[in-house]
Image: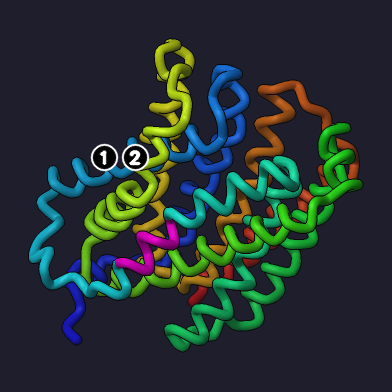
Amino acid sequence: MKRNPLSRAAQPGGAWFVLAAAVLWGTTGTSQALAPESAQPFAIGAVRLVLGAIGLILYAMLRRSITNPLRWPIGVTLMAGVSMAAYQLFFFAGVARAGVAVGTIVGIGSSPILAGVLGYLLRGERPGKVWGAATALAIVGCALLIGAGTGDIQAASSAVDAAGVLLAVAAGGAYALFTVSSKGLLETRPPEAVMGVVFALGALLLMPLLFVVDLQWLRVPGGVLVALHLGLVTVVVAYSLFARGLNSVPAATAVTLTLAEPATAGLLGIFLLGERLTTPGFIGIGFIFLGLALLSVGNMRN
């Protein structure tokens, strides 16, 4: 199969694009905390995906990247779009049952392992020893974050809802499948086109939610700002960076690098929201950054 000329532009520093995307994703929780109280998780997720899809499609059209739409592989494209929509539903449902800390970290922490398995089964990718060591360090860091920090986190970890954890793991699996399937599309198509089409499909699947959730919070200036930040910054900008980086690194590596998200969220909670983090929490963030540094350096040497 002939590769798209764009794929030759992939650079060894692609890991840094994925890291930058993960840092932007780490602002999602802080944005939600600043949203009006009437904003419900499902509403925020649906609005975020729809606004992000619109922005990505416009960006792809501006760059004239979406060509020959009838020649897109239906199976892989559907898999990527459905996976992204499923991720939104599983993630917010898992967080609602297991708690923000446990749901978020379990969902994100399970993704690298599942991405490694799916990458091997579907694409024949072998993550390697560096990925294994980096993933282990990052997951240990996430585990430390679950049991450390504010009283809310400690309370959540002491009474974990089993169904909530399963939903969070399902979210991690959906995100891993989205990454692996998107990786396949990126081999023959521009990053902005892939993200635009995949998110548009996911948005179409979730759009019915907009007719059943309360959107009154969008009438408040603060609500509009939160929605724009989530849609434009954490989707359009972040996923454009993620796609560019994914073009250069294996799917399992990319998903492990996204573990920078909980570390970023934790630091923002401390410095912007006044949350307190205990010593194990700081050690956990240190483990995450150590794993990410190991993976980034290893990727640049390849």
In magenta, the rendered stretch is 78-84
Q: Where is residue 6 in the image (x, y as percent from the top left)?
A: 21, 66
- The reply, left or right, for residue 210 in relation to residue 72 is right
Which colour style is shown? rainbow
- The reply, left or right, for residue 242 in relation to residue 128 is left
- The reply, left or right, for residue 160 in relation to residue 211 is right
Residue beneath the point at 56% across and 55% down: 258
Dot 1 amino acid type: Ile
Kindly report the secondary structure that dominates the magenta region of the rendered protein.
Answer: helix
Dot 2 amino acid type: Val
> Can residue 237 be seen in this snapshot?
no
Q: Disc 1 designates what residue?
A: 54
- The reply, left or right, for residue 123 in relation to residue 40 is left
Asked whether 220 or 240 is in front, the reply is 220
As drawn, the label of residue 50 is 2
Q: In which quarter of the image is the N terminus?
A: bottom left
Residue beneath the point at 35% across and 60% down: 81
**Which SS class for mark 2?**
helix
Residue beneath the point at 11% across and 68% down: 70
